[in-house]
Amino acid sequence: MRVHAVVLAFCAAILSALPAFAADPVRLGAVLSVTGPASFLGEPEKNTILMEVDKINAAGGVLGRPLEVVILDDETDVNKAVLAADRLLKKEQVSAILGPTTSGNSLAVMVKTAAAKVPLMSCSASRKITKPVNPYIFKVAPHDLLAVDAILNHARKHGYKRLAILTVSDGFGQSGREMLKERIPEAGFELVADELFGPKDTDMTAQLTKIQGDAPDAIICWGTNPGPAVVAKNRVQLGIKTPLYMSHGVASKKFIELAGDAAEGLLLPAGKISASDKLPDSDPQKAHLVTYAKAYEERFKSPVSTFGGHGYDSLHLVVDAINAAGSDKPQAIRDALEKTKDFPGVGGIFSFTPEDHAGLGPDAFIMLGIANGDWVIVGE
C-alpha cells in the first residue's frame, strides 16, 4: 500500500496550521486508486479532494476546525484496498471514508466500514454497492443501470434492435453485464452476442470477430481503461462499421488519448462535467460545473473528468452532513447523509433517503459522442 508523498506533505501542512484553528482537525479518510490500472480514475479524485480541502480550510474549515483527509493509494488492488480501510478505521480513526475508486474494491471494503459503523461514500458505480441498502454505505457515481438505460434509449431512437455486448471480467464489468443482460430483453431488444475480456487483455480481435459474425445492429463495450481503448482499435483494424457504445467507465480524455483515431464516432453516457462548456446556458448545473472545471484545470494543468467530480461530490456530501449534524461523529454523519436533499454536486443533484443511498436519477447522464478528438453532446 502506497501513501502518496503529496498527501503526506498535505497532512503536514494541515497539522502545522492547527494553532490558527486552536482545535483538533476533522479527520476523514480516502481509499483511492491513485496508481495502477485505474489511476486515470483515482488520480483526479485525489487531486480534486486536495484542492477542495484547501478551499474549505481557507474559508474557515469545518465546524470551526481544520479539515484533514488521509488519502491512501490502493494501487487498484483489492487486497491493498482492504488493508488501507483497516488502517483508516483502526489507526487513523477517521470519521468517514471516501472511495474506493473501483467497484470491486468498494464491494470488498464496505464490509469493513459497515461493521465498524463508519460511513463510506463510494466513488464507484456498481448497483450492488447500495442495493440492498446498508445503513452506512452511500455512493456518488450514478448507478450502472442508469447508464445502461441511457444507451438503450439512444439505440431505440436510432432503430437498433439486435445488440451485442463485450464486457470486462472485473467488478465493474460483471455488474454492467448483469444489468445489460437484464435490461436488453426487457426493453425489447435482442441480445445476439455476449463476450468477455480480461482487465489485462491486450487484444480483443477474437471476441470482435465472433460478434461481427452475429451481425448486431450495435455493440456495447463495458469496462474501464485500457481494455475499451483496445476494443476501439481492434474494431477499426477489423474494418467493423457497426456502431460502438462505450460505458461511462471511460468518460475521460484519457480514453480518447489511448484510443486515438479509433475513438472517432464512438458514443457513451457520461456526467455533464465531461462537456460542461458545451451545455446550454439554461442548464441549472452549468455555472457550478464550469467553475469547478476551471479551478481544476488551472491547478493541475490537465482536463477535468467525471471521476474528479466523484472526488468532489464524495467530500462535499460528507462535509455538508457534518455541518448539518454539528458533529463529526460517524453516527451523526450517517444520519445526516440519509437526510440530504437537493444537494448540488458535480455528478448531479443528490437526494438520499433511507431507501436510496445512491441519490441520483436519469438526469445524471447525457449522451456524448467523440469527434475530432473531443466530446460532443449528441442528445438521446
Image (cartoon, rainbow, N blue to C red):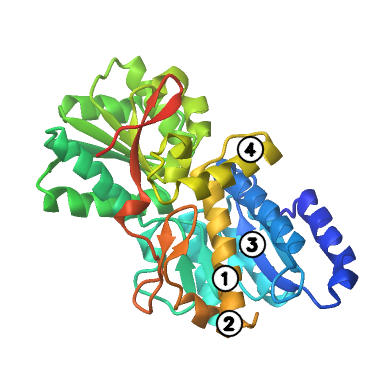
Q: Is residue 136 above or below residue 291?
A: below
Q: Secondary structure at mark 3?
A: strand
Q: Quadrant of the N terminus?
A: bottom right
Looking at the image, which residue is at 60% across and 50% down? 45
Q: Secondary structure at mark 4?
A: helix
**Residue pointed to by mark 4:** 297
C-alpha span from label 2 to label 4: 33 Å
Mark closest to the chain's N terminus, 3 or 4: 3
Type of amino acid at the residue the image marks with label 2: Ala
C-alpha span from label 2 to label 3: 21 Å
C-alpha span from label 1 to label 4: 24 Å
Residue 254 in sight: yes
Task: Tell me where residue 42 appears, x and y as whole percent.
Answer: 59, 48
Q: Is residue 359 above or below residue 46?
A: below
Few, some or many residues within 10 Å of mark 3 (<14, 14–19, 20+): many
**Residue pointed to by mark 1:** 320
**Residue pointed to by mark 2:** 325
